[in-house]
Structures are given as structure tokens and as C-alpha cells.
Amino acid sequence: MKEDTRHIHISEYNYPLPDERIAKFPLPTRDQSKLLIYRRGEVSEDVFTSLPEYLPQDSLMIFNNTKVIQARLHFRKETGALIEVFCLEPIQPNDYVLNFQQTAHAAWLCMIGNLKKWKDGRLKREMTVKGFPITLTVTRGECKGTSHWVDFAWDNPEVTFADILEVFGELPIPPYLNRDTEESDKETYQTVYSKIKGSVAAPTAGLHFTPRVLDALQEKGIDLEELTLHVGAGTFKPVKSEEIEGHEMHTEYISVNRSTIKKLIDHDGRAIAVGTTSVRTLESLYHIGVTLAENPYATEEELRVKQWQPYEKYNQIPPVVALQKILGYLDRNGLETLHTSTQIIIAPGYNYKIVKAMVTNFHQPQSTLLLLVSAFVKGNWRTIYDYALAHDFRFLSYGDSSLLIP
């Protein structure tokens, strides 16, 4: 175990970020954002539409196709108090797809706003969904850390939980934008390739891509593949502990199709990741492969990647071998898709296995995402951020982009 990684002081990953540098809204044309290029220590800039020019032919580029759900629900108590229920992850059933298909009852782990005003009792809201009048009732269950078990019940079998969120929910834009969600966010805070519902935050590096950029990448001969990581609210959780050892990473759910794993093997286990969510998924695949190399009959539970697992001593195996172990696992279990979860923390001291280049936005000071970037560029993150601050780049979710090639 690299003890020095656990003892990183988060205060060393701070930089001044004035509020006016945080992009509150996206540009009118998403692919016209600025692109910082970091190549082996050298920094330059361009426009995002030029991205394909900087990538080698025959590369494999991997995107996270998760879709942000309208996860914030508001209820008014008879006293007039407004309660916010923010759906984080499904509990019953705990599979996203099955949960969204429920037609009478669903349970989620939720954060609750104005909790002190909701001591007990049920909250109700009358609404019309798909032309059907329904009454939605929510009941608060046990507390789990900073979240609560919440039961949702409604009285019309024609209406699914997905329908309710679609009509009644509000898109949860990041808290640091310091503004209310607007109608335009429903489109601008989704990637153009989003498909699989489940995230409570967008994989924002993907927001810059447009059909013309995707076409240009394919014309260059770059293979495009997708995977799914549902982004949890923990992605915004600040590191409160002095050393990162005291920070607990949130669990995020991933699914990767057999065809994507095969494509990775065809590309010698090397990929360009779009966004830190794709990075975390791809790097987690390696550690899942290591688990299977040691225990080919590992259960789904045993395949979950724990926070510090990558830093423990184990037999190093080539990325392609790790990926082949996953294919073998899928074959033995008659599966087309690997479903599991990851709690991985990527910080200086981590050795990247699969990701050879990444497209990413500019992250908050003292965040785990900044640690991930620092690990990738061998500690040289200040060069990148100093350049971005000096050259008028826009920061965070709706901000500009960077291409990092260490």
C-alpha cells in the first residue's frame, strides 16, 4: 500500500477560483468552447471542434452515455413548509431500469432539504401525469448517513416512476452554479448521446460534443464506444478531512457491454476517456479483472471496486489480460453486460492502466476530481490550471474543456 497516497493533504490541491470564472450557463453552441491541450508538459489552446486533429488515428474513445434524471421533487406541507426530496439511488428495486418501470411503489435513498420541518407523517402531492390524475405519497424511513430511505407510492398503474420524475421532478444542476434550474438546462445539461437514465449530475466533459464533432472523429478513423456510470451527488462532496484517508468515496453504479470490452482488447487495452466518470469506470475494469484473475468465480458483490483496492499489493497483470478475465466471467455467467459498482479513488500515487488520454473540464479546488487529474499528469496540474486562469478559460460544469496527454 502506498501510504503516501492516503496521507495526501487536500490543502495542497487548492487554487483561487473567483465566482466570475465559474460558467453559469453554457455557450450558445456547445462545441465552440475553448480547448486547452496539455501534451507532455506543453500547454496550448484551440477550439473544441479541433479536438479530432489532436488524436491519433485508430484510437478508441470512450463516452459515458448516462442520462441525468429530474431527481429533485418538491412537496409543500400543510403548514406551508417546502420540503425537497432529492433521489440519489434506487433501493427497492435497486436496479435503475426496474425501479423506473415500477407502477405503484418505489423506494430510493434520498437527501432531504428542510428536514427539520418534516418530523414525521406523509407528504402528498396531487398531479396529472400522462393525462391521469394521481396522488403521490412519500414516507420517510430510516436514516443512512446523510441520506434517508424514502418510499414513494401512487395510485395509478398506468403511470411509472420514470413518468413521475419526468413530469414532476426538477433537473438537479450543480449547487455551485448558485441559481435555479431553468427550462433550457433540460437540454444543455445532457450530453447529445445520453441514453441510460440514472445520474444526478451530468458527465460534463461530454457536454461539448455535437453530432459534427462525433462525425469528424469517426472520419478520422477513431472508434467510438460507450459505457455507463451513473454519477452520484457525492461527486460534489468536498473533501472535509485534512488527509484524503479520511474522505469516503461514494459508490457509483457501472455497466459495460461485452462489445466495449472486446473493443478495448482489440485496442491493446488503451483508450481515450471522455470525462472523469469514464476514467473511473475504465480504471475500475482493470481492478475487476485483477479480482477475477485471483478468483474466477467471484460474486457480483466481490467484483465491486473498493476505495483503496488499487493501492494494495497484488500481482500486476497486463490490462489486456485483466479485460480477458472479465470476458471469461461474462461467458461463464451467460451475460452480455458487466453490472457492478465502484468506489475507486484516483489520486497521486495511482498508476493508470487503461486511460492514455482524457478529455475533461476544469474541476473545483480541493476536489477528488482534481486529485484524479493530478495523478494523470504526474503532479503537473498547476501548470494547466495556471494557464486556464491566465487565459480566460471558463470553469466547472458549463465551462471549457481540456485534452490531457501525459
Image (tube, helix red, strand yellow):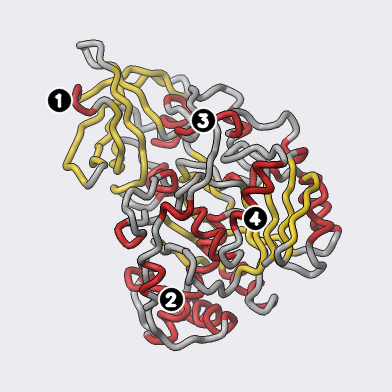
Q: Secondary structure at mark 1?
A: loop
Q: Marks 4 and 1: CB-CB under 8 Å?
A: no
Closer to the camera: disc 2 or disc 1? 1
- Residue that badge 1 annotates: 121
Q: Residue at x 80, y 67 (%)?
A: 56
Q: Residue at x 51, y 25 (%)?
A: 181
Q: CA distance from mark 3 to mark 4?
A: 25 Å
Q: Is residue 341 above or below residue 349?
A: above
Q: Marks 3 and 4: CB-CB under 8 Å?
A: no
- Residue that badge 3 annotates: 177
Decide: few, some or many residues near mark 1? Use Cα within 10 Å; few <14, some 14-19, many ≥20: few
Closer to the camera: disc 3 or disc 4? 4
Closer to the camera: disc 2 or disc 3? 3
Q: CA distance from mark 4 to mark 1?
A: 54 Å
Closer to the camera: disc 3 or disc 1? 3
> Which mark sits nearer the N-terminus, 3 or 1?
1
The residue lying toward the viewer, choosing from 180 and 136, is 180
